[in-house]
Image: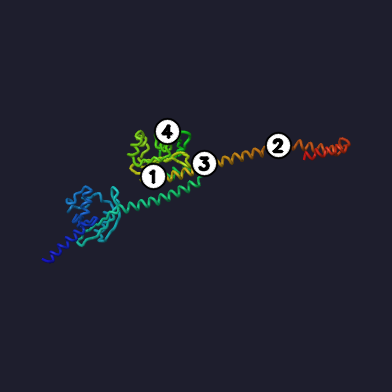
Amino acid sequence: MSTTKEEAQTGLAVQQALDAMSDVYVVYDSEYRFVYQNRAQREAMLRAGLDPDAAMGKNLWEVMPFLIGTKGEAGTRKAMTERVITEWEETYPPDIRLHGRAFPTSDGGVAVVARNISDQWKAEQRHQAAEERMRALQETTAALASALTVDKIVGIIVSKGLETVGAHAGSVTILEGDELHIVASKGYDPEFITQYNRFKVSDDLPLSVAVRTGEPVILTSTEMRDQRFPHLVEARRRVGGGAAAAIPLVIDGRILGGLGMNFPDGQIIEPEDAEFIKTLAQQCAQAMDRARLFEAEQAARALAEEANKAKTNFLTTMSHELRTPLNAIGGYADLLQAGIRGPMTDEQLIDLERIKRSQR
């Protein structure tokens, strides 16, 4: 009688301890039927729209068919059939990361413990994403540093830069007077590019606003984009995607153009994303300005070389044209000195020597 009471008290204490756990704890019999659920498991089922009481005694895969095909199913079945401890990590909708473990029980069943590690996992994902972006930015910066023409620079931006920030479409525009001209693009259909190939800085478009004000226009979601530019909803649907960013390309207070980006539908531009986009745009502006200076220097050098070539050609021609008559003058002076035209007075010989000296 005393033993039974002690066992009951022990069982109650164990149950209270399990209920106090923040981790999910659930036990299944050898037929995968629910035998026990702690409080965390019951609350998780209620959040998923399931009835934990109705699940008791029923088969796990019938109650939760969405688990079929997951790592959780594989780990649970392996623990059951091979009688070994298994472990796994898996992400479940909408964005929940669980670390699960399965333990075979003495009566032929299996117990599963699952810990929610979403916060830690998301932090690690953000850290990895930041490192990957930094590497990508360094690669893009290196490519921009080696590019010596504006055409190559804008090509690098649309080929490497857009991918770096996760944009599926984008364009680089150059400011020409009061117009913006698309000089490179990716991800747009030709008809769209034809329609927006040139547009006014005064237009109510994201890039126009960014260039006109000199400030980035960050539309963090589809809803924000459609609310700010309702007249562009149809154009946005044609392009595809939702969130967008328009960044002026500024160097030393001078606006060179703009960088526009469109992101996949459902993707949100986080604050760190916006800062990264601004950094990329700054790198683009600096590279474009450097390329323009290089191109101007090359053009000036080519002009100087052309002028030197023209000068050399002129001197060569004039030297040839003058040499012929001067040689003739020298020849006639030699004949006169030789007395072929008769004797010469001393004064005449002195004059002939002066003529020859001038000729030489």
Q: In terms of sequence position, does the residue under pointer 4 or pointer 3 come before the other?
A: 4
Q: Residues within 10 Å of mark 1 (few under 14, many from 20)?
A: some
Instruction: Give the mark nearer the N terminus: 4 vs 1.
Output: 4
State which mark lies toward you, 2 or 1.
1
Of the pair 38 and 277, the residue shown nearer to us: 277
Q: Sequence order check: which comes first, mark 2 or mark 4?
A: 4
Q: Residue 151's mark? A: none
Give the residue number, with chain letter if any, for mark 1. 274
Q: How far apart in space, not on screen, are marks 2 and 1 (Cα)?
A: 66 Å
Quickly name the residue at label 3: 292
Cα distance between the residues tagged 2 and 3: 39 Å
Q: Name the outermost residue toward the bottom.
A: 2
At numbered mark 2, what does the secondary structure look like: helix, strand or loop? helix
Q: Position of residue 46 (x, y in %)?
A: 21, 49
**Who's the residue at 15% across and 62% down the image?**
9
Return the disc, 2 or 1, that comes first in the chain's sequence. Answer: 1
